[in-house]
Every structure is written in C-alpha cells, then in structure tokens.
Amino acid sequence: MVDKHLKYWLVAPALIIMAMTLLYPLVAGFWFSLHNWNIAQEATLGPFVGLDNYRLILTDDPDFWGSVRVTGIFTVFSVVITLVLAMALALALLLVGNDGLTVNVRTLLVLPFSMSPALLGISWRFLLNPEFGAISAGLGAIIPALKGVPILADPTLAMAALIASDVWHWSPYFMLLFVGALAALPQETIEAAQVDGASRFRVFWEIMLPQLRPVLTIAILLKAIFSLKVLDQVVTLTAGGPGTATETLAHLVYLTAFRFYDLGYSAAIAYLLAAVMGVLALLYTRFVMERA
C-alpha cells in the first residue's frame, strides 16, 4: 500500500532548507527594518519604531533618492545596450553558420559570463588604470582627449565604465538566449519575405522581431532584475564613487549596514529595493506561466 504521506516527507527537507535560507531571512529582515538598531551602539535589537525608517527614507533621505537616480540610469542603459548587443551577436552567429570557427568564437564570447562579478570589477579596475590599463590605453589611442585620463575619477566616465563592464558580463548570456529563439523561428515566413524581395533589415524588423516579442519581454524583465541588484562590481570597480556617482541602491544598503552598522535602516532600504524587484519577478512569473 502506497503511503499517502510519503510525498510530503520527500519534499520536507527541501522545504526546511528553503525556510531556513529564504523565509527566515526575509521575515527577520523586515522585523529589523521596524527597529532603530545600530550595532555600533547596542548589540541587541533596538527600540521598535514601526514604519519610521521607511518614512525617513522616502521623505528625508537625499542619499536614497540619489541612489535611486543612479540605479535608474544604470538599469536603463545596461538593459538597452546589453540586449541590443546580444541580439546583434546572435544574428551575426546565425548568419555565418555553424562551422568549427563559429563554435570556437561562440565559446570565446561566452567566457565573460563565466567570471564572477567581483573578479570582473577587479579586472576592469586594472584595465582602466590610466598608467598601465589596456582599455585605458586603447581609448587614449582612439580618442586622444582620453589619453591618461583617470576614467574612474570622473563621474560620467565612471558610470560609463560600470555600465560597460556589466554589458560585457551579461551580453553572452542573452546572446545564447537569442540564438536559441532565432533558431526556433518558423522559416516559412522568413523565406516567403525573402522571395518577395524584402531586405535583411525588413525581414528582421517586420518578420523576426514581432515573433521574438515574448523572448524579448522575458529578457528585459530578467536583465532589469539583474541590474537592480548589482553590487559586486560596484564594490570592486568604483566603490560607489567618485563621490556617490555610481552608488546604486544595493551599494547603499551595503554601506549603511557594514560601514555605518545601521542594520534597521539598511533593512528598510533593502525591503524597498526588494519590493521593486518583487514586482518585476511577479510580472516575469505571470508572463512565463501565461506562455506555458
């Protein structure tokens, strides 16, 4: 006789692990956000202040709104440039075919995605060094005005460098996503348009792109979530500087918690960021479920 409760016992370990690693930190973090708790002043949980942390963040914290602006700029440019570049690479790989050279090139293009974000930031910091950095030297040769310029010391150039490093990291992932999506398109409509004399651009813009809309929607939502939570390369590449020019919301949470030791306030900021990411995750989940 089959044990009716066996299925619950089988999934119980996974549920317990998820509760310990996901549910408990979420609940504890929200509870911390309702308290005034600076561990530099007191080791135990501080006094209960309700929603005061959230009120202060939204009404009287210019650092928070500055980080919102930085995060918005970074997210928009990162998403757009990454997806455009990934689509261009995917189209180029499909046009040249699947010979041995293409396979090797595809493998090389995927390598940046295999790097950890922290290592990526450190690597780009060396590459952008004005004295011996390869990228800095290359930019100086192409644009003489940038020769010897400390890129990470300029607010605009530092943001551009942070976006470029993120695009370099994520483009291979979305390139593979688009390669698969393009290969799965029905060839009949494409061939019919080519027979009618449509140019490659019109075939892509009017035939292929509308059919890729579901994949593009998923890619936009995923990349937006990845961009909102960027932290590792901010810490290792720019440290949020110069000043607060590249201080994203995730980096502000990190600084508030681990430099100023204000766990209650940092938890509140983290929950506001998590709320935005939760909305995007919900949209992503509903879209995927509707397409299933």
Image (cartoon, rainbow, N blue to C red):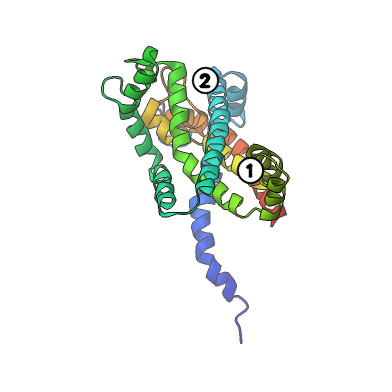
Identity of the amino acid at label 2?
Answer: Asp
Toward the viewer: 175 or 208? 208
Dot placed on the residue nearer the N-terminal end, 1 or 2: 2
Whether 58 is drawn above or below 254: the answer is: above
Is residue 168 visible from the viewing direction of this image? yes
Is residue 257 visible from the viewing direction of this image? no
Locate the N terminus and report the quarter of the image it occupies.
bottom right
Q: Residue furthest left?
A: 132
Residue pictured at 65% horizontal, 43% vertical: 217
Toward the viewer: 33 or 141? 141
Coordinates of residue 211 in the picture (x, y in percent): 69, 47
Residue pictured at 37% horizontal, 21% vertical: 139
Residue tagged 2: 63
Toward the viewer: 139 or 233? 139
Distance in Å between CA atoms under marks 1 and 2? 33 Å
User: Callout 2: 10 Å neighbours few (<14), some, many (20+)?
Assistant: some
- Report whether 149 appears left or right of 191: left
- Report whether 274 appears left or right of 124: right
Q: Secondary structure at mark 2?
A: helix
Residue pictured at 43% horizontal, 52% vertical: 103
Coordinates of residue 267 in the picture (x, y in percent): 52, 34
Coordinates of residue 19 in the picture (x, y in percent): 53, 55
- Numbered tag placed on residue 21 in the rendering: none
Identity of the amino acid at label 1?
Answer: Leu
Toward the viewer: 257 or 126? 126
Which of labels 1 and 2 is toward the front?
A: 1
Residue tagged 1: 216
Q: Secondary structure at mark 1?
A: helix
- Report whether 225 appears left or right of 134: right
